[in-house]
């Protein structure tokens, strides 16, 4: 690759950094209206819903990986297990599954 | 204020590091087949640190797309982070702007999720630094390893590990959903909207996540305030 790849990386780095840094620095020390604060407090749970669905079903071309993986993750999480157990347990379930197909 | 510091952050971020491992390894490998040198591939992970955008850039490079278009595309994919860091700002301890500018670099979908879902209020900057350090370390290290070894994990392990980040999101969300209808509704509406955008193809992934998240957060807030409950 030529020098253009380095300019591309630089450009990508800048435009990725802007949405990360502007709110955290600009909003420092500013009190937002309560309604906006409430919406922002809702964001984490909504983001997780959108990050999980529907992508969790499409982790592999074979849809069964997604279905079994999702069932394992929810099944383990509902017992109240901590995040690390949910992650390792889901991987283990899928590893066993893939050895059988 | 939440008292946990750097080492607690490392621990909280460990599941991200596990989830990044197979993705970074594959990125390093794909970057090599795309024609990027070890330095170019690793530099992209060092300076950009954004999984989805980096993967897309490889396919655009292969397609011979102009750098300006690749950069614009990267921006569009990452616009959703405006929303996440605005939300995260409510959760973090007040601190010097230069420190916040520094750790802002490490906010990804995953580090945001881990930080935003913590029980305590006013998380310490050092806690965020811990979460980010271990995530970033895994991303950069395994990008280089993937390029160097030029091979992937055994297929069964690669396939099994592709659930890791989603399992982490599930594990983060579940405890908050317990007996909390508001949290369940927030996640469910965003999930439904995002699925709608996905299957209809109305919006690309980056926009779909942004719009469905914001819409869900606003709708639930309107319902909650109308009901007179906070």
Image: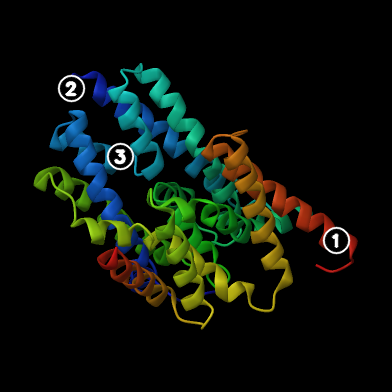
Q: Residue at x 59, y 41 (%)?
A: B199
Judged left or right of residue A94, residue B166 is: right
Judged left or right of residue B86, residue A73 is: left
Judging depth in this view, the residue of B90 and B194 nearest the camera is B194
- Label 2 sits on a secondary structure element that is loop
Q: Residue at x 14, y 47 (%)?
A: B151
- Badge 3 or badge 1: first in the primary sequence: 3
**Distance between mark 1 and mark 2 Cα atoms:** 55 Å
- Residue B49 position, x and y percent, is 34, 44
> Which picture quadrant has residue A7?
top left
- Residue A70 position, x and y percent, is 48, 64
**Distance between mark 3 and mark 1 Cα atoms:** 42 Å
Q: Are marks 3 and 1 on the same chain?
A: yes
Farthest front residue in view: A101
- Residue A63 position, x and y percent, is 44, 54
Q: Quadrant of the N terminus of chain B?
A: bottom right
- For disc 3, the neighbor class at 10 Å (few under 14, some 14 to 19, many from 20) is some
Residue of label 1:
B225
Q: Is residue B215 visible?
A: yes
Judging depth in this view, the residue of B225 and B175 nearest the camera is B175
Q: In the rendered view, would you say A46 is above or below B180?
A: above
- Label 3 sits on a secondary structure element that is helix
Tag 1 subunit: B
Judged left or right of residue B33, residue B44 is: right
Q: Quadrant of the C terminus of chain B?
A: bottom right
Residue of label 2:
A1
- For disc 1, the neighbor class at 10 Å (few under 14, some 14 to 19, many from 20) is few
Q: Residue at x 48, y 63 (%)?
A: B169
Which mark, residue B47?
3
Q: Is residue A34 visible?
A: no
Tag 2 subunit: A
| Visual colour scheme | rainbow
């Amino acid at each position: 690759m030529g020098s253009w790849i380095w300019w591309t990386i630089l450009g990508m780095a800048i435009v990725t950094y802007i949405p990360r840094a502007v709110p955290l620095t600009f909003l420092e020390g500013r009190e937002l209206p309560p309604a906006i604060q409430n919406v922002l407090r809702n964001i984490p749970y909504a983001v997780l819903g959108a990050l999980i669905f529907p992508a969790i079903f499409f982790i592999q071309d074979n849809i069964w990986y997604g279905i079994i993986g999702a069932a394992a993750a929810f099944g383990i999480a509902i017992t109240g297990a901590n995040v690390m157990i949910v992650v390792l347990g889901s991987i283990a379930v899928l590893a066993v599954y893939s050895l059988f197909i | 204020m939440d008292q946990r510091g750097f080492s607690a952050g490392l621990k909280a971020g460990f599941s991200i590091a596990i989830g990044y491992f197979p993705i970074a390894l594959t990125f390093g490998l794909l970057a090599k087949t795309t024609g990027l040198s070890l330095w170019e591939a690793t530099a992209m992970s060092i300076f950009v640190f954004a999984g989805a955008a980096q993967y897309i850039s490889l396919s655009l490079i292969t397609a011979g797309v102009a750098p300006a278009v690749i950069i614009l595309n990267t921006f569009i994919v990452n616009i959703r982070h405006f929303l996440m860091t605005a939300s995260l700002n409510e959760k973090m301890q007040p601190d010097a702007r230069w420190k916040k500018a520094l750790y802002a670099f490490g906010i990804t979908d995953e580090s945001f999720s881990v930080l935003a879902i913590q029980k305590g209020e006013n998380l310490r900057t050092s806690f965020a630094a811990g979460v980010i350090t271990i995530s970033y370390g895994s991303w950069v290290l395994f990008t280089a390893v993937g390029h160097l070894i030029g091979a992937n994990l055994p297929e069964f392990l690669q396939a099994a590990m592709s659930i890791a980040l989603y399992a982490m999101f599930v594990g983060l969300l579940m405890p908050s959903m317990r007996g909390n209808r508001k949290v369940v509704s927030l996640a469910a509406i965003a999930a439904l909207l995002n699925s709608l955008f996905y299957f209809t193809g109305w919006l690309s992934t980056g926009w779909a996540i942004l719009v469905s998240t914001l819409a869900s957060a606003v709708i639930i807030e309107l319902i909650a305030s109308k009901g007179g409950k906070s």
